[in-house]
Image: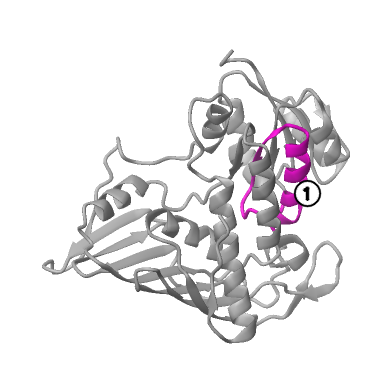
Amino acid sequence: MIMETIRVGMIGFGANTRLRHAPGLLACPNVSLDAVCNRSLQSSQQAAAEYNIAKTCERWEQVVEDPNIDAICIGTWPYMHCPITLAALEQGKHVLTEARMSMDDDEARQMYEASQRHPELVTQIVPSPLGMKAHKVVKQILADGRLGELREVIVLGTNDAYANSDTPLHWRQSGPYSGINMLALGIIHEPLVRWIEDPIRVLASTQTFTPTRLNPETGQHDPVGTPDSVQVITEFPSGARGIYHMSGVVHHGPGPEIHLYGSQGTLKYAMAPDNKLYFGTSNDNSLSEVPIPDDLAGDWRVEEEFINAIRGIEQIEFNDFAKGVRYMEFTKAVELSAASGVAVEVNYSA
């Protein structure tokens, strides 16, 4: 019974689906990709030919309504995550959806509530890959109390992807496609709250230096719907304070990093490109690299986790819908604070 074939329908077949989800699902025993719907029939047919998928569909609803499909893998941009998830759950399908979870916090709550109405179905959000390698080691350092009392947090994520004003509009900058998601805020915040408590208050500032960009789809200059630069001051339940700096217009700036400063030590995780962890106590002269033993090193196994959860072998850790709701509600608070110029309490519902 455990090894019955699980038939997966693919909705959206972009870069991450080709790189990770399709190969990862097919690497699991007794899993087949049985239907696909991408943005065009031609691209659906190309994906079907490449991965030997029997059925191509012109509308995503055809995949969801197919009685032979057991699970749906959503690889679209965020604007489709909520409607597809709601429909799939109503049709009795397990759901693995790309991140970010949704367009906004309201959609995230709808998705979470629908998952609660169907506890027999597995629901998973593709997690941030950042921080996975040293995840267990970071948890161990914190559990051992080596950091002491957490006092300050720094979260960095800068690059120069949008520094040139002539760079065309990316879908991630499009409000109708990406919603309230901004830069790398969500993908770097997510690993932080795997290790420490969620922030309860934010004060944010944002700026868009290039308000319009050429949209390759329309040939017109369209409004940029997300900021080029984001700064956030956060407060944690313990009283610790945090500073976030996200930017797409910084040359030679720091990539994704998380720093935790405690009363007895400092932990620094440079998550890309080096993927190295550093730690030092108050008695050390400098930080030292922390080795990651092979038996503690985390790796990408999202698709395996999804299939194993369907088979009842394990529970979803990275990420269930409750975690997704919380990071979307954090993002909403950042948006509200930036718009109003005042600090905003983060109201978590899950």
Given residues 164 and 202, the one toward you in this image is 202
Q: Is residue 43 above or below residue 243?
A: above
User: Where is residue 169 shown, x and y percent of the image?
Assistant: 73, 68
Q: Is residue 16 above or below residue 345?
A: above
Question: On the image, numbered disc 1 is attached to which residue?
Answer: 83
Report the number of numbered marks.
Answer: 1
Confirm whether the magenta stretch covers residue 181. no
Residue 63, quarter of picture: top right
Magenta-drawn segment:
77-102
Q: Residue furthest bottom?
A: 341
Position of the C terminus, as image quadrant, is: bottom right
User: Where is residue 250 shown, x and y percent of the image?
Assistant: 52, 76
Q: Amino acid at mark 1?
A: Pro
Given residues 200 and 191, the one toward you in this image is 200
Label 1: how many Cα within 10 Å (few below 14, some 14–19, many 20+): some
Q: Is residue 234 visible?
A: yes
